[in-house]
Amino acid sequence: MRILGELDRRLFTRVATARVPGADPALIRLSHLADHGRLWMGAATGLAALGGRSARRAALRGIGSLAIASLTVNTVVKWSARRPRPCSTPYRRCATSPVSRGPLPSPPATRPRPRRS
């Protein structure tokens, strides 16, 4: 397992430091599109809408496979193979602990301040 971990780190570093002009914006959009299986849901929707009966059946199988794979990975695999989350790039500093505050400012910061005359 240690060999696979080292290979994973080497590949991540190589990909993260690679500079391909124009790839970053396209890959960022593609990554956001793929969040929560939206890319595959869209492909299945297109297949079901444009195809016949067998295409709709294939789209349904694909959605079922996505649900089963997601359930398996998020329950069994993530809990059995725990590891720290990698940084998004090797040059950024990783957060060592989750942020305890929410996204909104604290109530004292939102109160209007009295005007001085």
Image: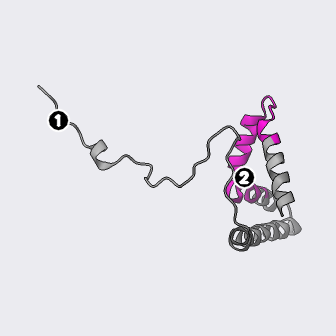
Occupied quadrant, residue 5 = bottom right
Q: At 21% across and 37% down in the image, what residue appears? A: 113
- Contact flag, marks 2 and 1 (Cβ < 8 Å): no
Amino acid type, callout 1: Pro
Q: Residue furthest front?
A: 2
Give how far across and how far down residue 62 sits, in percent. 81, 66
Q: In the picture shown, does residue 76 fall above or below 51?
A: below
Q: At 27% across and 46% down in the image, what residue appears? A: 108
Give how far across and how far down residue 56 sits, in percent. 82, 67
Tell whether position 41 is magenta. Answer: yes
Q: Is residue 86 left or right of residue 99?
A: right
Amino acid type, callout 2: Ala
Provide the residue designation for mark 1.
114
Q: Nearest the camera: 47 or 101?
A: 101
Q: At 67% across and 55% down in the image, what residue appears? A: 85
Specify the segment rendered in magenta. Answer: 14-43
Occupied quadrant, residue 93 = top right
Give how far across and how far down residue 81 sits, in percent. 74, 68
Q: Residue furthest left?
A: 117
Q: In the picture shown, does residue 50 fall above or below 66?
A: above
**How has the structure been colored for display?**
one colour
Give the number of the disc on residue 34: 2
Q: Is residue 21 left or right of residue 38?
A: right
Q: Nearest the camera: 33 or 106?
A: 106
Is tag 2's residue or tag 1's residue first in the polypeptide sequence?
2
Indicate the quadrant containing the C terminus: top left, top right, bottom left or bottom right.
top left
